[in-house]
Amino acid sequence: MSTERWTAATVYPDMWTDPDDDPREALAHPVGEKETLWNYLKHYRITLEMKCDGLDAEQLARRSVPPSTMSLLGLVRHLAKVEHGWFQEVLAGRADLPPLYESTAEQPDADFDGAVADPAVVEEAWATWRHEVREADAWIQALPEDGLGRTVQRRGKEIPVRDVLVHMVEEYARHVGHADLLRECIDGRVGQ
């Protein structure tokens, strides 16, 4: 574990990038509720990518602390699975699609258990996550501004679309917090 703090910042040395270089700053001025929720989601997605930037397969697959199977690569796979489940299966009504990283008795948490230090696994995880993000963004783009109050069925219950988007923001926020700690243990890069 590194004891030094990693930074690319020159203006604010306690940050890992200067605000002018932070790609999330472009999302600072949304208009309307849909765009606001979508921007928060985009912000956390970018943060996930930034947390994983520059790491090799071994570092991405490095587990947190036993008995946890959590790793940055596992988070990428897990969030791809979450994007797929909520946007494709629930919001788009595509229950016919096969689930991602389906759990088995041997791998009860396949998204995390299968996150191994193999460049091919890393490449597949990022390709899958980016595909699911594009599909989700296309769905959100097509949603009318007044569509947030619309409801969808999940497990026999009516759920407002707004709640799903808020849940996605919550899901990413939680896991980006995990990513902060995982990354800091790898090379000292801290959250911002």
Image: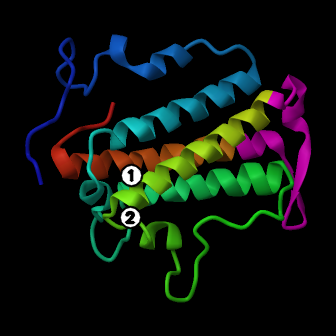
Image location (x, y in percent) of residue 39: 61, 26
Q: Estimate how packed mark 1 is, as few (under 14), some (14 to 19) or many (20 or more) residues with alpha carbons within 10 Å.
A: some
Image location (x, y in percent) of residue 176: 43, 45
Q: Residue at x 27, y 62 (%)?
A: 62
Among the two numbered marks 2 and 1 on one chain, the one whose residue lies closer to the N terminus: 2
The quarter of the displayed image where residue 30 is located: top right
User: Where does label 1 land, which residue?
Assistant: 178
Residue 87 drawn above or below residue 99: above
User: Where does label 2 land, which residue?
Assistant: 70
Left or right: residue 153 compared with residue 51: right
Q: Residue at x 16, y 34 (%)?
A: 6
Q: Residue at x 61, y 73 (%)?
A: 102
Image location (x, y in percent) of residue 20: 35, 10
Of residue 2 and residue 53, the one placed in the foreground of this image is 53
Q: Estimate how packed mark 2 is, as few (under 14), some (14 to 19) or many (20 or more) residues with alpha carbons within 10 Å.
A: many
SS of the residue under disc 1: helix
Residues in magenta, as a range: 142-165
144 is within the stretch colored magenta: yes
Left or right: residue 103 compared with residue 124: right
Q: Amino acid at mark 2?
A: Met
Of residue 191 and residue 96, the one placed in the foreground of this image is 96
Q: Amino acid at mark 1?
A: His
- Of all residues, the one furthest to the bottom in this rendering is 105
109 is within the stretch colored magenta: no
Residue 67 drawn above or below residue 111: below
